[in-house]
Every structure is written in structure tokens, then in C-alpha cells.
């Protein structure tokens, strides 16, 4: 009788009639309380229709009847993960997935889910080991590469995170979540390493451009604006530095002849004989001349103190002349530098970890 009811339940489950199948499996369990298969199918069917606590109780019964039932341990771990993220559920999930890995050392999904549970519990080193074991079993597991990359990103080990995402993209070149999170990792690294900043930002833009979502397009656009702004700031800094160096040289030459000339004369000497604004030269270049006779004369502020930090080019400060902003030496207009974007643009939120399915 138990076997007949169990077979009817299996037929109903295959047709997708899970509620009817559950009723049959419950009858089968009542007829034979030691049936491992009936308990397992009852648990699996309950899990399919989100009766999670019922499913967990039936998996626990399977484990009591057959402690080496690997799939029961695996699915119980999965249910503990779904039922809560508190310490109790995390520890139970870790125990179940560890046991599943022991019972089947070749189960890639068990190692991946063990990694997820360990990460949730804050055991990041153990989580790294679990993901690496999954990759050793299947180097083409995009899920393992992706989750390991996310873990390294959380640990701020961005070089290894980017390497993991690249390995994932070798397996699945168009994997959008991998591309998107790699863009974020590159964007984060651009703030930390000035030597690779420009290359990292350009590569992040390339990653975002390959992801057809509004969020990715916005991230790419912001980084493109950031690159443009920083390039403009650097160019402005170079122009202003060259300008003041030429002023300094002209002043030094005039002093070497035994005479002195005003800042207006120095600019006139090196310029194109056009009327020029009268600057007040700053102390770092050795000048203290001030045109006190012309209180409304425009002032040129010294920009030589600008420096480039490890995270971004510092904002260059330049005064806009009080009068109409005519050209400076060599036709350079004195205008305030554009306000910079943030160090790495607005950082988008990374994609969630990849999950495996219950069985």
C-alpha cells in the first residue's frame, strides 16, 4: 500500500500537482514511517511550494533515518539560509553544507553554498577556501568565480577581485553581473592606485558600456565626465605653470640687467604687445610687487601649489579677472577651473551573489 501511494505521489509531482502529491507522500509516510524516499519527496515537494519549515522538518527526519543522505543535508542547509540570517540559522546552514561536502567531495554546489554561508557568518577566510575548492572541482564554474570576486571586493582586495571577474568572463564573456561588478571593482581601485587610475577608469567604462542597463549607462557617463574634467584640470595646471615660469624668467632677466620692471612690463615683454591684465605675483616665485595705484586691477592667483593626490587631481584655483576676462599670455583665458566630480564618480551597487538551486 505504501509503495502504491508513493508512486501515485511521484506521478502527481511530475505533472506539477504538488499539493496532491504532498497528500500522497504524507499517506505513504503514515503507512511506512521508515521510508526515506517518501520523507525526502515530501520534504522536496513542500520546499517547492515554499512550505519551508515543514520541508525542513521532513529533511531532518530523512537525516535521522539515513545520516549519510547527502541531498537531505544539502537542502536542509539551503532552507536554513532561506529561513533567517541570524546566528542560529547561519551556524545550522554551515553545519549542513559542511556535512554535504564531506559526504560528496565533488559536489560543486555544496562548496559554493558553504562559501555563501561562511561569508554571511563573517568567516571570510574559510569562505575563500570553500570557493577555491569549488573552482578546483570545476574551473569553468562562473558562479564560483563571480562569488569569489564579490568576496574579494568586500575585503577590499581589489586586484584579486578583478582577477576573479576576468576569469569568470573568460568562462562566460557576456556575463552581465560579472562585467558590472568588475566595473565597480576597477572604479574602486582607481581611487587607491594613482599609477593605474586612468587605465582603471577607462576599463571600468568599457565594462559598464557592455551592460545594457540604465544603472550601467549612468555609471559609464559619470566616469567619462570625470575623465574629461580631470584631463582639463591637468591641462589648466600645466598652462598656468608654464605661464608663471615665463613671468619668473622675464623678471629674472630684467633684474640681471640691473633694473626692475613691473609685472605689466614683464607680461608685455613676453606676450604679443596686446594689453594684458596686471597680475600680483605670488611669493613662491619671489615677487611681492603690487599695483597699488590701480585698486580695480584684476588679480592672477598663484596656482603653483596645486598637486595631484593619490586619488584624484586636486582642484586648480584660478581667479576670474574683475573686468571682462580677456586673454592672458599666449591667448589663455583666465577662468576658474571646472568643479571636479568625486574621486571615482557615484559608485553603483554591485550585483548580488549567484545562488545555486535546491535539489
Image (cartoon, grey):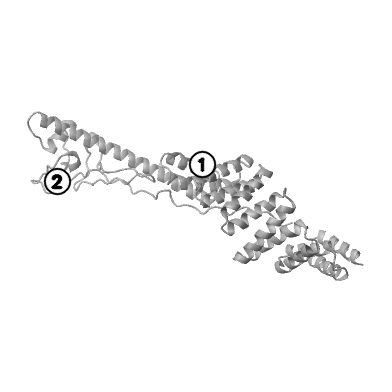
Q: CA distance from mark 2 to mark 1?
A: 48 Å
Q: Give the SS element for disc 2.
A: loop
Do the residues bearing badges 2 and 1 touch, measured as CB atoms within 8 Å?
no
Mark 1 crowd level (few <14, some 14–19, many ≥20, 10 Å Cα) = some
Q: On the rendered structure, is 216 left or right of 101? A: left
Q: On the rendered structure, is 261 left or right of 130? A: left
Within the image, what quadrant is residue 43 found in? bottom right
Nearest the viewer among 145 and 182 is 145
The residue at the far top in this view is 257
Nearest the viewer among 261 and 140 is 140
In the image, what residue occupies the spot 14% across and 46% down?
Answer: 297
Q: Can I make out residue 17 in this image?
A: no
Label 2 or label 1, whichever lies nearer to me, is: 1
Report x, y in % for residue 80: 67, 63
The dot on residue 135 is none
Q: Quadrant of the C terminus?
A: bottom right
Nearest the viewer among 119 and 266 is 119
Q: On the rendered structure, is 22 left or right of 134? A: right
The dot on residue 206 is 1
Within the image, what quadrant is residue 83 found in? bottom right
Report x, y in % for residue 3: 90, 63
Report x, y in % for residue 27: 85, 70
Q: Can I make out residue 134 in this image?
A: yes
Q: Quadrant of the N terminus?
A: bottom right
Residue designated by label 2: 297
Report x, y in % for residue 192: 43, 46
In the image, what residue occupies the spot 59% across and 59% down?
Answer: 120
In the image, what residue occupies the spot 21% across and 33% down?
Answer: 246
Q: Earlier in the sequence, mark 2 or mark 1?
A: 1
Amino acid at each position: 500500500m505504501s509503495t502504491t501511494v508513493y508512486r501515485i505521489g511521484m506521478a502527481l509531482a511530475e505533472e506539477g500537482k504538488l499539493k496532491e502529491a504532498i497528500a500522497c507522500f504524507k499517506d505513504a509516510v503514515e503507512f511506512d514511517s521508515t521510508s526515506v524516499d517518501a520523507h525526502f519527496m515530501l520534504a522536496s515537494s513542500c520546499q517547492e511550494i515554499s512550505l519551508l519549515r515543514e520541508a525542513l522538518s521532513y529533511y531532518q527526519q530523512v537525516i535521522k533515518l539515513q545520516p549519510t543522505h547527502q541531498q537531505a543535508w544539502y537542502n536542509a542547509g539551503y532552507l536554513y539560509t532561506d529561513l533567517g540570517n541570524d546566528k542560529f540559522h547561519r551556524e545550522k546552514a554551515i553545519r549542513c553544507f559542511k556535512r554535504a561536502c564531506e559526504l560528496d567531495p565533488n559536489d560543486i554546489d555544496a562548496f559554493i553554498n558553504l562559501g555563501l554561508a561562511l561569508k554571511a557568518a563573517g568567516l571570510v577566510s574559510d569562505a575563500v577556501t570553500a570557493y577555491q575548492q569549488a573552482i578546483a572541482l570545476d574551473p569553468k564554474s562562473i558562479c564560483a568565480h563571480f562569488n569569489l570576486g564579490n568576496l574579494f571586493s568586500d575585503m577590499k582586495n581589489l586586484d584579486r577581485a578583478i582577477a576573479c571577474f576576468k576569469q569568470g568572463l573568460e568562462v562566460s564573456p557576456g556575463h552581465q553581473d560579472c562585467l558590472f561588478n568588475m566595473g565597480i571593482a576597477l572604479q574602486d581601485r582607481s581611487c587607491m592606485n594613482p599609477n593605474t587610475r586612468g587605465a582603471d577608469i577607462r576599463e571600468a567604462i568599457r565594462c559598464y558600456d557592455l551592460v545594457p542597463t540604465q544603472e550601467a549607462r549612468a555609471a559609464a557617463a559619470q566616469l567619462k565626465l570625470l575623465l574629461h574634467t580631470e584631463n582639463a584640470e591637468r591641462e589648466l595646471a600645466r598652462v598656468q605653470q608654464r605661464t608663471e615660469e615665463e613671468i619668473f624668467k622675464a623678471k629674472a632677466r630684467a633684474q640681471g640687467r640691473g633694473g626692475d620692471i613691473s609685472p605689466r612690463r614683464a607680461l608685455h615683454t613676453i606676450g604679443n604687445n596686446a594689453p594684458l591684465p596686471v597680475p600680483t605675483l605670488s611669493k613662491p616665485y619671489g615677487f611681492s610687487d603690487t599695483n597699488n595705484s590701480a585698486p580695480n586691477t584684476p588679480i592672477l592667483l598663484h596656482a603653483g601649489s596645486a598637486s595631484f593626490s593619490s586619488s584624484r587631481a586636486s582642484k586648480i584655483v584660478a581667479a576670474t579677472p574683475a573686468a571682462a576676462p580677456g586673454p592672458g599670455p599666449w591667448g589663455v583665458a583666465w577662468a576658474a577651473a571646472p568643479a571636479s566630480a568625486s574621486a571615482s564618480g557615484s559608485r553603483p551597487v554591485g550585483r548580488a551573489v549567484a545562488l545555486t538551486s535546491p535539489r
